[in-house]
Amino acid sequence: MEEKSTHKISNHTTEAGRNNLNCEYCIIRISLERNKKEKLYKCNTCEQSFSYKYSLKRHQMLHTEEKPLLCTNCEKYIARQNNLVQHPRIHTRVTRENQYQCIHCEKCFAYKSVLVIHQRKHTGEKPYDCSYCGKRFGYKCYLVVHQKRHTGEKPYQCSSCEKCFILNKDLVRHQRTHTEEKPYQCGHCGKCLASQSTLVQHEKIHTGEKSYKCSHCTKCFISKQQLSNHQTLHTGEKAYQCTHCEKCFTRKNNLISHQKIHADEYTGEKPYQCNYCEKGFTRKYTLVNHQRIHAGEL
């Protein structure tokens, strides 16, 4: 192939040459420039950048409360239910494009990058590690969000109470506590819930699905959190530590209840008030026990 300087002189000195798009060198050069397109579209949540707007939109689905439809073969996010039916056919269709085959399950893929993502399901590979605590992640965007927990960065602030959050989806879910909005309705009993994840967990009560099994015993649970809480009975682990007195707890809700004692010490806050004598308490169960005194008087 001609050198760039020689090529310009010999082929583009005339007006016709400057407008010539059939030039082999220029076609290759234009193709390379397209591949090196500047990444103008930036994610507001994790700051990852993309060359195309549709790539950014697809990526942002990872951060939203509404979970999109996911192809189990290539982890591509699908916008519509009917597309989710059509899309998997590209994985099962036998063509010369499906040249990359998984050595674990024999599924085929058109692109090597898609195969690499798929194989992480089998290998458990997590190539991205946190520089603060060493925790590993399968995707860079998850690592970026995780690291904000170490840095304390919380860019999303509630306009009602000024509470801040790491993710926009957490802010949206929190704001529903102010508006009392519950847009997700159970198809079994009609109950309305504030988030899609809560709805998914609630519907398992009707279906009886318990997909989380304890590795120590035969018990199964509806949610991963319930399983984690149960497993502390076997391990004795107390992962939740109070920042005021360093006391540890097996469950997060127990820690929250405990910290109200310190809230009382520092702020005098007693959110649970007796309707009979207006005495205040830091814990709800303490209020319930107190009200039994009045119940005996009535």
Image (spheres, rainbow, N blue to C red):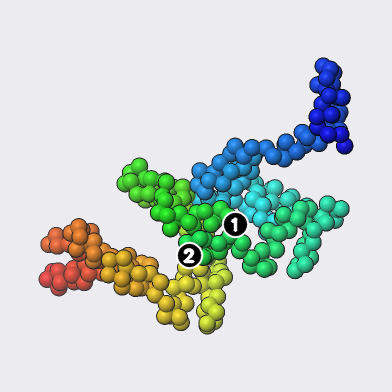
Amino acid type of the residue that numbered disc 1 sits on in the rendered structure: Tyr
Q: Secondary structure at mark 2?
A: loop
Question: Quarter of the image containing the N terminus?
Answer: top right
Asked whether the viewer can see residue 4, the reply is yes
What whole-number distance in Å separates the C-alpha atoms at marks 1 and 2? 16 Å
Residue type at numbered disc 2: Cys
Q: Quadrant of the C terminus?
A: bottom left
Residue 140 location (% of width, % of height): 58, 55
Look at 56% across and 53% down and name the residue there: 141
Please tell me the numbered disc located at residue 239: none
Q: From the viewer's perspective, is 232 left or right of 93?
A: left
Q: Image point 49% across, 57% down: which residue?
A: 146
The image's mark for residue 139 is 1
| Circles 1 and 2 in contact, beta carbons < 8 Å | no
Which type of secondary structure does the marked residue at label 1 adopt? Answer: loop
Q: From what the image shows, is residue 146 above or below residue 291?
A: above
Residue at horizontal 14 percent and vertical 62 percent from the top: 279
Residue assigned mark 2? 133
